Amino acid sequence: MADRYLSFTGTAPGRFLTRRLGLPQPAELRRDALDGGLLHLTAGKSDLDPAPVLARTGLARDEDDGRPAAVVLDATGVRDIDSLAEVHAALHPVVRSVAASGRVVVLGAPLDAGNHHQAAVQQALEGFTRSLGKEIGRGRTVNLVRLTDAAPAESTLRFLLSPASAYVSGQVIEVGAEAQGAGPDDWTLPLAGRTALVTGAARGIGAAVAETLAGQGAHVVVLDVPQAEDAARRAAERLGGTALALDITAADAGERIAAALPGGLDVLVHNAGITRDRRLVNMPADRWSSVLDVNLASVLRTTDALLAAGAVNRGGRIVATASIAGLAGNAGQTNYGASKAGIVGLVRSLAPSALAGHGVTVNAVAPGFIETKMTAAVPLFIREAGRRMNSLTQGGLPADVAETTAWLAHPASGAVNGQVVRVCGQSLLGA
Ligand SMILES: NC(=O)c1ccc[n+]([C@@H]2O[C@H](COP(=O)([O-])OP(=O)(O)OC[C@H]3O[C@@H](n4cnc5c(N)ncnc54)[C@H](O)[C@@H]3O)[C@@H](O)[C@H]2O)c1
């Protein structure tokens, strides 16, 4: 399961040999701390004042043009071709100096439908961001946040300017204008006093999500199939949470969850998922239906039942798990791709619904190649291709998806709604 190539290129002979052969040079991603300060630049005439929020990210201002760990370019004021040139002028001299595993975050404005010049150059920022992400290398990430006010984007900026977003690159994230309630008093334990249910949490990504949410103060409910009850119970005990042995495809799964949680839920993470790969010509109906049932139908059913039972508390966070296979499609995965694209449809439809009036957000994470038992079972050649075919030339870790989920589950992320955020190292598959 371990990425031996990444370990090999981390050694001097490995680096020498792979360089000589022109092979990928994955950088060891920093997941502990960013190394350096923050450089705040502006292109165009901005009305935004992100400085107070940036000051709270924990990164010191990079006063001397040294080696910033992060560069934030406020391009919200870019409205025409001339001001778009300021994006080049601002970043061209500094991009080389950004530290390894550093961050570039571009702040953009919503597209103005009534002004095609503004819309064109703001859209241009997406192509810019994704292209820079593909070329910047050395474990550095580049993301674009569209916003009109910095305050509701604080949790998002903190996330993108931290090691928690190590495997998130090439993303465009829209943050709404309203903060939807105050941020937490304690940013280290933002989920204290909240209950979070994670499906499929006995192992893999779900186990990491449960651990991260518990680490941020949540009482976690570790749900998994009865066959995995022992592992679920051990995980729950370790995290001070509760285990719930339940097959999520059971017709009454939602009702049983609601009954088990009389205080309701603050965070609901639909993570359980399966693959049953075959090309469509060879795919029997049962392989199709089992994947659709676990990955999509049960998510629809349990969400409906929990909402009908009033079990999702005010200010709740629903995070569903899509996949890049649902965005780009993948040979041998018509069932899986359909199920994961369905998650995107669910999120986009439910997010702006009546739930928003109760401060409930609905978002999705779309993992790329993540090192788990699911991907360890993939044949070697396809596995190696999956690992390398992204801008960071390596697979992600379950913790990367977990940190992204925790950001979406954050009480201060109320203005992040209806987003599908890839955790894929900017996979070459599907944009
Ligand atoms: N690993 C990746 O690279 C990757 C990439 C994209 C998306 N994803 C998605 O992330 C999620 C987690 O993937 P993973 O790699 O950790 O998988 P995994 O197989 O390691 O773990 C999945 C967990 O879900 C549980 N589960 C399966 N069916 C269930 C059911 N009916 N009821 C309750 N629990 C059930 C399993 O018992 C298991 O504990 C899935 O939705 C998967 O599709 C994973």
Image (tube, rainbow, N blue to C red):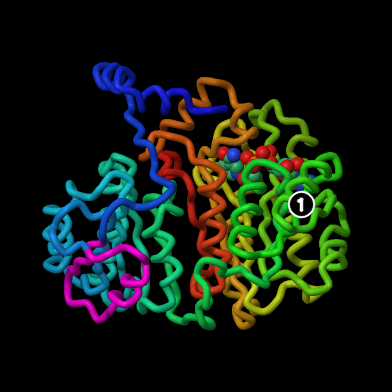
* Magenta stretch encompasses residue 216: no
Q: Nearer the viewer, residue 30 or 307?
A: 30
Q: Nearer the viewer, residue 183 or 295?
A: 183
The percent coordinates of residue 60 (x first, y second) are 27, 64
* Magenta stretch encompasses residue 48: yes
| Circle 1 SS class | helix
Image quarter hosting the N terminus = top right
Q: Which amino acid, mark 1?
A: Glu
Left or right of residue 66, residue 237 in this image: right
Left or right of residue 305, residue 1 in this image: left
Q: Residues in magenta?
A: 38-61
Q: Nearer the viewer, residue 159 or 284?
A: 159
Residue 122 versus residue 134 in the image, above or below = below
Tell me, yes or no, if residue 121 can be seen here: no
The percent coordinates of residue 410 (x first, y second) are 55, 68
Left or right of residue 118, residue 263 in this image: right
- Are there few (<14), some (14-19), or many (20+) residues within 10 Å of tag 1? few
| Residue at position x 19%, y 69% in the image | 42
Q: Which residue is mark 1?
A: 237
Total tally of numbered discs in the picture = 1
Residue 178 versus residue 81 in the image, above or below = below
Figure quarter occupied by ligand 1:
top right
The percent coordinates of residue 336 (x first, y second) are 64, 41
Tell me, yes or no, if residue 139 can be seen here: yes
Residue 79 versus residue 329 in the image, above or below = below
Residue 79 versus residue 212 in the image, above or below = below
The percent coordinates of residue 220 (x first, y second) are 71, 60
